[in-house]
Image: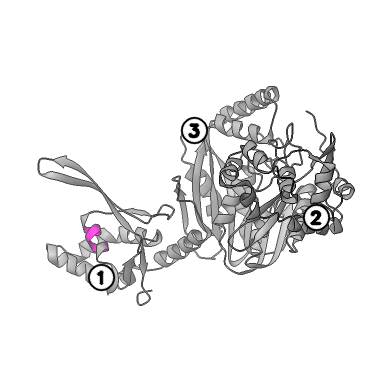
Amino acid sequence: MTRSPARALPLQDLSIVDRLGDDLRHAGYSADSVPDLLGESAHRALGRGEFWPALRASSDGSPLATCIRLFLLGTTESDAAVRAALPATGVRAAVVNGVLEPDDDGFRAGLDIRPHADDDADYLVVSDLDSDTRPGPVYPDHVLGVGAASVSLARAVIRRPAATALDLGTGCGVQALHLSSHVGRITATDTNPRALALAGATARLNGQRWDLRQGSLFEPVIGDRFDLVVSNPPFVVGAGDRRYEYRDSGVVGDGICEQLIRAVADHLNPEGTAQLLANWMVIGEQDWRERVGAWVSATGCDAWVVQREIADPAEYVSLWLADAGEARERAVELGSAWLDWFAARGVTGIGMGVVTLRRTDRAAPDVVLDQITAAGEEVTGAEADAFLARRRWESSTSDTDLLGARLALASSVILEERSLAGHEGWAPVLRMLRRPGGPGATVQVDEWGRALLAGCTGVLPLGALVDLLAAAHGLDPQALAAAVLPAVRVAISRGLLHPTQEGA
């Protein structure tokens, strides 16, 4: 199916946006009521992309059921049902503003409008319908809705109160919505006029006001600085073609992520933070840290980069072809050319992760690049903020001051030991301290580190514990300190060990 990229911008009549919001609220269309109506099983199935249980559960003809079927399931509903669900908006105005489309003897949704919630509030998010809820591939100016990537970034963003924030590549405005809970003034940019139109509708439906600006990268905010910058950019790695604006930057390879990372420090206030999702090429046998490390080191910021996944090129291409809903024949053509491009450049994988930068203006910025792929160890805003703070404290504390500090183990830390059977019984071969739920929150210790950290209760200075341990085993205190301090520093930076108030 060939689709023209030229489409009228939706929801340009703000009075219709207001009426639509009134209708959806009166219908009870919210993040709580949708799963209540569908039931737990059907709602879980819908999250997996299985639509029929939700269709079966939403057949009572109520305004709420009609809204669910229209905007979440992509069905065609009768004229009478639509009029009952959207009385204030009106069918004609909804069609003119792109909310509905005539279809057979009724109407189907022209937009995806869905409830979305976080710990602070319930929202409504306006985006385009994905390929699984309407036939054919998406349009070139398709505006992506709430997805796994946007939710992942929202969870990773540090929620400190801030005066100003920039949502670069806002799309339908998901990140800006979450920023509203802790930011005074929000600027949101995008290259796609349709994205800005839908972001504007999202803001208005939720009673928010954002400064929306069109342009690429930092062009719309030249000369501006922010306390926080977040971005879920069009990071898909490829030859630089721009078939779909939501995923393709038009920049060859992983250049868009490199450009964004290298430039972001110029738009941060002192102590400002930037957080973004990124993809990068893994070339041959080269460690991905070399490539991405060069980008973040050039910023002069403290940095924590976490690679959450690495995809095989064929898996990566298949993912994005399916996401756009490409027809089989076209997918074969596009996919083959895409894989040929990867092969010609020696790309053996595509890394995916989250980048956190903080402008500290330190002479020697702290840069950490981690590969953390385990489930349950996702980066959260609280963990990212704490990690940067712990790294700064640890790196600015001398060995002498560290030995004078009172340290305590986090309450959730557990010790894992693995042993091999031998002639004299079980012989430990691995001792690992772990803080469950903390990204990369582990430290390997030897028998001395195991004993020393067990004594860290915040009562005695670390140096006194070292002296006691050395005396008990006839060891040289200075040699023991030199042996255990590296593990102590790792334990501090990973949140297993922390200075008490007296030792901070």
Q: Which residue is drawn at 36% across and 70% down?
A: 499
Q: Give the range drawn in magenta.
A: 448-453
Amino acid found under the numbered disc labelled 3 = Gly
Q: Distance from label 1 to label 3 (Cα)? A: 46 Å
Q: Mark 2 points at which residue?
A: 20
Nearer to us of marks 2 and 3 is: 2
Q: First in sequence, mark 2 or 1: give its number.
A: 2
Q: How far from the left and from the top, in percent, is residue 110?
A: 79, 43
Nearest the viewer among 331 and 133 is 133
Label 3 sits on a secondary structure element that is: loop
Q: Earlier in the sequence, mark 1 or mark 3?
A: 3
Residue 422 falls in which quadrant of the image?
top left
Query: For mark 1, does the 10 Å Cα neighbourhood hold few (<14), some (14 to 19), or many (20 or more) residues?
Result: many
Task: Write down the quadrant of residue 248 in the picture.
Answer: top right
Residue 87 lies, in percent from the top left, at 84, 53
Label 1 residue SS:
helix
Q: Can residue 237 be seen in this view?
A: no
In the rendered structure, the answer to whether residue 59 lies left or right of residue 432 reads right
Q: Name the residue under label 1.
A: 463
Picture coordinates of residue 390 (x, y %)? Answer: 43, 64
Disc 3 marks which residue? Answer: 284
Q: Which of marks 2 and 3 is nearer the N terminus?
A: 2
Q: Which of marks 2 and 1 is in front?
A: 2
Q: Cβ–Cβ below 8 Å for labels 2 and 1? A: no
Task: Name the amino acid type tagged 2.
Answer: Leu
